[in-house]
Image (spheres, helix red, strand yellow):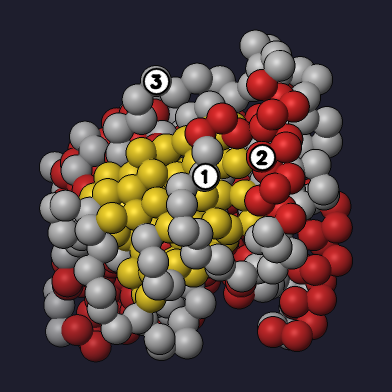
Amino acid sequence: MTPDDQLGERFRGGEEAALREAYDRYARMVLHLARASLGSVPDAEDVTQATYVAAWLGRDTYDPDRGSLLAWLLGIARRKVVDRLREGGRQVRVAEAVRQILPADPAEPGPDRIVDRLVVADELGRLPGEQRRVIELAFYDDLTHQQIAAVTQLPLGTVKSHLRRGLARLRQRWEVDGATRGVRPAGAPRAG
Amino acid sequence: MPHVGSDRLVLLALGEAVTEEAERAHVEYCPACQADLTALREVASLGRETQGLSHQLSPPPLRLWRQIAAAVEADARPTVAVQPPTRWYAGRGGPAQAYPGWGGAWRRTTLVAAAAAAAGVVATLGMVRALDQPAPPAQVAASAALTAMSGAPGGARGEARVLGDAGGGGGERLHLHLTGLPLRPGYYEVWLINPDTGKMVSVGVVGEGTDALLPLPATVDLREYRVVDVSAEEYDGEPAHSGRSMLRGTLTS
């Protein structure tokens, strides 16, 4: 059981310290999703607050078996973001706020993409140190297997296995949490 | 051709190798390999996009947690005999029509409330006015017993009453009778909290005296903003709730 599972269980059980922990650990991610989607800091803080309150009041409905606490929180925040974007007059305010606070970027990803990134980033942070380093060298520095082996002085076989296992873990988390949100079915099990 | 091996899939997903013709032909007709390759490519692409993400994750301001904590505590207070609010209570337009059982008391209520309005209370909108006497009970539309929160002295308690519209367009008011709150630097502020969303509105400041009459903003629906909260505030220029609730109770009609 990962620490997050325990946190999820405690959260669900109504332990107030778990709410604080969930806030300390994930509020910045919820805030990031809201801010990146709404473009307004006050609206993003509003959504973050509403997300945590709604999550706490609805903690009975969180099922740790169906996805991570982070993904569940982000799912609530995502719905609130969408609701807010739909609110009529609000859009004008959002547009205003975007102009004032953040430069509008047409290439900005939608809320779903941001949720996916946050979930993958969270899982990446949970990988064992060496595995994480190997994955980051592949992702961020675009190094090949051989280059990673040279940089880290790990045997090529170890690098391969880190990449394979690390990617598999990221994929599993992404699929499970994506399935929680109902936007993407978990991948078909691999035959043979 | 057999399935694409797992190490090979990683190479393809990371873009380190290019799909060979035989692989391409196999993947095209093998749902399992197709799903694997698509998913791993997507994960690798998402993984690359997380670069620098941690630097963009700024911590939320302190008051955000305070507001969440305050709202959540509102939920934790036991709410005794919560009844669905009456239409009268909800509707601010025409007070008398839809409230069952109010009967002849309404006229008397109106008169009493009008007297209060005439006393200049309603005119000082946005200000707090200490009263010498508690309001007469007949005009109470909803009330809440306020009990001490963890930060308050044990003897602290209070009562909040929503007084009906006086008919002069002054709207509803919140009467507070508070006892046992310690004298301290700073002041006490009164909030209405919507326990479902955590949103709150400040309805005024309680200064000297233990009784206060606060005009209620007509835009606030008391069906939603039904938790009355008295917080201890500092003169720190921070308009948000301090997170230190002293008294709290849920309005029932």
Amino acid type of disc 3? Ala
Q: Could you tell me which residue is drawn at 42 percent across and 38 percent down?
A: B144
Farthest top residue in view: B101
Q: Nearer the viewer, mark 3 or mark 2?
A: 2
In this figure, which residue is indicated by the disc labeled 1?
B135
Labels 2 and 1 touching (C-beta < 8 A): yes
Q: Nearer the viewer, residue A134 or B227?
A: B227
Earlier residue among tags 3 and 1: 3
The location of residue B140, given as percent across then percent down, is 56, 34
Return the mark for residue A25: none
Chain bearing tag 2 is B
Task: Give the residue at x 19% y 43%.
Answer: A15
On the rendered structure, is B46 left or right of A133?
Answer: right
Secondary structure found at label 3: loop
Mark 1 neighbour class, 10 Å CA radius: few under 14, some 14 to 19, many 20 or more: some
| Left/right of residue B102 with respect to residue B81 in the rendered view | right
Estimate how packed mark 3 is, as few (under 14), some (14 to 19) or many (20 or more) residues with alpha carbons within 10 Å. few
| Secondary structure of residue under mark 1 | loop
Q: Give the Cα separation between the discs numbered 3 and 2.
A: 28 Å
Q: Which chain contains the residue that carries disc 1? A: B
Q: Residue at x 76, y 18 (%)?
A: B98
First in sequence: mark 2 vs mark 1: 2
Q: Chain of mark 3?
A: B
Q: Are marks 3 and 2 in contact (CB under 8 Å)?
A: no
Q: Position of residue A41 (x, y in %)?
A: 60, 74
Where in the figure is residue B142, as x and y percent of width and height? 53, 33
Q: Which residue is mark 3?
A: B81
